Amino acid sequence: MNPLLASWSTPFGMPPFDLIKPVHFEEAFAKAIEEHDLQVQGIAEQADEPSFKNTLVAFENAGQLLKRISLTFNNLNASCSSEDFRAIEKTWAPVLACHHAHIFLNAPLFARIDSLNSKISTLGLDVEDQKLLRRHHTDFVRAGARLNTSDRKTFANNSTRLAQLFTQFSQNVLRDESQFQMELTEESELAGLPDFVLSAARSAAIERGLKDPRVHVITLARASVTPFMIFSTRRDLRQKLWHAWCHRGEQPGEHDNRPLIKEILKLRLQQAQLLGFKHFADFALSDTMAATPEAVRQLLMRAWQPAKEKAKQERLALAQAATESTGQLHKAEDIQAWDWHHWSEKVRKATHDLDEAEIKPYLQLDSLIQAMFDVAGRLFGVRFQPRSDLAAYHARVTCWEVTDDQGHEIGLFLSDNFARSNKRSGAWMSNYREQTGSPLPTRPIVVNNNNFSSAPPDQPTLLSLDDAKTLFHEFGHGLHSLLSQCKYARLAGIHVLKDFVEFPSQIFENWLLQPEIMNRYARHFVSNQAMPATLMKKILSTQTFNQGFSTVEYVACALLDLSLHEQTNFEMLDLDQFEREGLSMIGMPGGIGMRHRLPHFSHLFSSNYYASAYYVYLWADVLVADGFEAFLEKGDPFDSQLSAALKKHVYEAGASVDPMEAFIAFRGREPTIETMLRKRGL
């Protein structure tokens, strides 16, 4: 029998990964869609008058089989893709999009939901039930439920086509990333690279079947690119790698993402205008905390102006360092994007007596995993027990049983930390199963994916400080799902407004560098000695170092994203020209590249979620800086009263309450932007 269609008697209801094969998904999708259609039809066409239970709760609980299959497929396709998975995605992504579009355009079903929404105050619903009704009603309206018959058809066709384009975009980026490798075969090509970079590059070579021990490979995983850009003294190789990194998704021919982006933008604009909005940015932001493009731009510009000036000063300092190091005069304009990481590390060493090679031996992956578990336990009373008896989808994925401090089951946490050639780039959290409280409580199964460079088998994996922050960041997302205490999956965990979803993840990063955590878990991988207090002090003193660069490369992307989606005509769009002119208009400092150029900007073009909304990380950072300040004011990063409030009003609440109300309930007031600017040294 097809394991995707069978009952899962596995521990925690974890997918039976050893039984699931790509060939199973086509039959499973077809049957699950058919089942979901019948369930929705039954809700829409029932004779009984609409009630919250027979309409909203019934709709919420419909399609469980399809959700289970879709979550399993999407996770496997992202973490361990293959030609078979990609072929299935190409076939079924538009089918699934069409299926969901037609559900939201089901007139009798929407009529029932609309009727209930119109008399919501008379239904005797509690706060969470009201939230569910309003949320589903909004979802339907934003999916075109109020359109006329002709426009509904157009909307559904556009949704189906967008799914095809998103899939092709993502597959093109993965193709470019997986096919590139920069082989280092000469001793001179290794100049400047410390042992941990060499070990990771040798592991990458082995994974790609290159057995010659003299061969090292740099891939397009960020954890491979960034260390090479920092340490390599071969400027020509840094430039070669930078060029490959920046030109993902724009290789001429059938894998060029630029024509796909143009079509995506046209379809988004048409969808937004069908719904009565001027452009897609207006539509996308109308369902966020920010609410308008003007509010987003105001926030971004508050950070942009001081960051731009700081970045110019940073570039001058890099030029001076290059001049002193090489004996040759370097002007600011001589520092290019492939030089910035390299010379900024030299400046950090000269001004703060600190470099990445000094920090990394103390940041062992296994120890930092224990550190984040310890933080979660002290803040929120949760425990993590390794479950080596559970077989995940890959041999290097670890499983952890999560319980509260009384031993009651919370869920299951999967950790997939290492880069693979068939794995999507970046870092992300997702669910194999979402938390629900009604009618049958279900416990979440959460997975964190990272793309760290793996050490050889006999050595521990060491992380950069940025990678360590990423580890904590994604675990913050994971806790948001694990700790959820909502009745309904649509409101649970990460299903909050998109400019609030990064708050639980980004605030959790703050506990990484707490002295008591570092003293216990940041230990040298050879001597097991704790990180010296002098080194810890230097790390803390450099938290605003290079923040001009970091803020500029991020905010430039967010401003370009917003501007692109405010356009109302894409017929003559030249994407490269739009990038150049857009960066020129905002005064992009020289020597800094965009963190994500448009042809590989997966946040924007692999789905609609972050389109017009790349700003959300900065919006969340306003909440984070102000929110964590509350712990600093108490003088205790583990203050029990504050951590209990953070757990109750943020991590447990999901979308059952308004996000600003949730923040105020935790913090006691609305946030201010000044704390964020101060934190960044701006």
Image: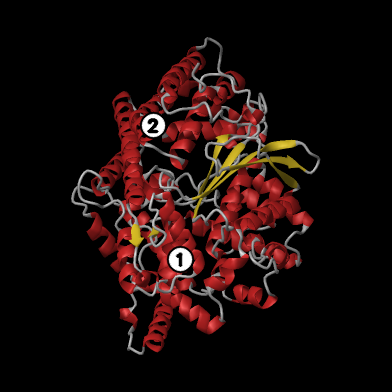
**Quick check: can you spot residue 304?**
no
452 or 273, nearer to the observer: 452
Q: Residues within 10 Å of mark 2 (few under 14, many from 20)?
A: many
Q: Which residue is mark 1?
A: 227
| Image position of 20 (left or right of 640) | left
Q: What kind of residue is marked 2?
A: Gly
Q: Secondary structure at mark 1?
A: helix
Q: Residue 179: where, in percent of width, then height?
A: 32, 49
Residue 571's tag is none
Q: Nearer the viewer, residue 570 or 86?
A: 86
- Between residues 660 and 615, which one lies in front from this camera angle? 615
Q: Which residue is mark 2?
A: 144
Classify 517 as above or below 355: above
Cα–Cα gap, marks 1 and 2: 47 Å
Q: In the image, what residue occupies the spot 41% across and 47% down? A: 421
For the residue carrying disc 1, how many other residues have a C-alpha within 10 Å: few (<14), some (14-19), or many (20+)?
many
User: Which mark is nearer the camera, 1 or 2?
Assistant: 1
> Residue 294 location in percent, x, y?
42, 57
* Element type where label 2 sits in the image: loop
